[in-house]
Amino acid sequence: RTRMTRLLVTGGAGFIGSNFVHYVVENTDHTVTVLDALTYAGNRESLAGLPENRVEFVHGDITDAELVDRLTAEADAVVHYAAESHNDNSLHSPRPFLDTNIVGTYTLLEAARRHERRFHHISTDEVYGDLELDDPQRFTEQTPYNPSSPYSSTKAGSDLLVRAWVRSFGVQATISNCSNNYGPYQHVEKFIPRQITNVIRGIRPKLYGAGENVRDWIHANDHSSALRTELGWTPEYADFESGLAATIQWYRDNEAWWAPSKDATEAFYATKGQ
Ligand code: NAD
Ligand code: TDX
């Protein structure tokens, strides 16, 4: 256990952010302020049951400079998850991706700079583009950025802002570029929960194209605890099959959590022929 710290967690009512807040409450003495706009992807219920003396919820937007400034000043460190996160949505309506991912990250960086706060930026491996199926190469920190979608290009842009604020202004920041996460509290628009909840509802799973896309999956809890080379971290959910089985069980046990967004998500996909 480490010294007690107050963390400002943006996007803490989303999938990975809420898993992180649960993880912090269970494994540290830190207190958490969640800043979340509760977009379609945010869900207050993902934080249900957490002790009020450890987790404060603030409903607000990361592009609100005044609010971000105050909350950053009150925190010891900022962990930044808030984003528009769905590639499919970015193809239909890119504008919110620019506002949240670029302007929102800029707003947080300026506050971290002003108040000299440690800043961790959650990004994605999709900034590196894609690999051929038989490509012997894997992405490293040195791989050039080559994003494909409006989503990944705004994440790449936000990463470059973080790098520039480190170089230009000495902000103490780190970036993680994680692969696909799975686990509880993931929105039913995403691949794994969409197929689990389709099967529960008796709908055929939907595979895009010929189903040849490949993803690297990491359990959200392992994302919360990770940094392998320097810290000697190893994943707890090393066996994908049992991690997936536990995730399927979670969706079976928590239909009340996902049912309210299921019909709207499928109705939207149907309008796009997906
Ligand atoms: P998510 O869509 O489930 O959650 C995003 C959260 O951010 C929601 O609670 C939403 O309400 C909030 N939010 C959105 N816009 C906001 C704004 N303007 N102000 C305040 N809050 C706002 O996303 P996720 O899958 O949990 O992803 C979290 C982060 O991890 C993102 O930065 C994403 O790019 C990154 N990431 C995700 C994955 C993955 O597999 N899901 C993999 C690698 C990296
Ligand atoms: O119904 C589907 N059928 C299907 O074949 C859906 C929803 C997706 N897919 C495919 C598309 C992708 O190849 O499955 C793969 C995974 O799709 P998503 O779950 O939408 O995730 P992806 O586009 O890979 O992006 C995710 O990982 C990287 C997160 O949503 C991003 O936030 C993260 O940066």
Image (tube, helix red, strand yellow):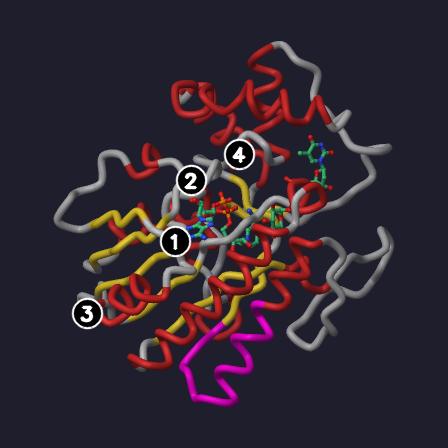
Q: Residue at x 46, y 68 (%)?
A: 232
Quickly name the residue at label 2. Answer: 42
Q: Nearer the viewer, mark 1 or mark 4?
A: 1
Seen in the picture, residue 190 relative to 30 is either above or below; the reply is above
- The boundaries of the magenta stretch are 158-174
Q: CA distance from mark 3 to mark 2?
A: 29 Å
Seen in the picture, residue 205 relative to 118 is either above or below; the reply is above
**Which badge, 1 or 3, is on the more N-terminal residue?**
3
Depth order, front residue of 17/217:
17
Depth order, front residue of 15/107:
107
Q: Residue at x 63, y 61 (%)?
A: 154
Q: Position of residue 203 (x, y in %)?
A: 66, 13
Q: Secondary structure at mark 4?
A: helix
Please tell me how crowded label 4 is: few (under 14), some (14-19), or many (20+) other residues with Cα within 10 Å: few
Mark 2 CB in 8 Å range of ligand 1?
yes
Q: Is residue 237 left or right of residue 149?
A: left
Amino acid type, mark 3:
Arg
Q: Position of residue 69 (x, y in %)?
A: 30, 69
Query: Which label is found at residue 3?
Result: 3
Amino acid type, mark 1:
Asp
Quickly name the residue at label 1. Answer: 61
Q: Secondary structure at mark 3?
A: loop
Q: CA distance from mark 2 to mark 4?
A: 27 Å
Quickly name the residue at label 4. Answer: 242
Q: CA distance from mark 1 to mark 2?
A: 12 Å
Amino acid type, mark 2:
Gly
Please tell me how crowded label 3 is: few (under 14), some (14-19), or many (20+) other residues with Cα within 10 Å: few
Residue 86 among magenta residues:
no
Please tell me how crowded label 1 is: few (under 14), some (14-19), or many (20+) other residues with Cα within 10 Å: some
**Which badge, 3 or 2, is on the more N-terminal residue?**
3
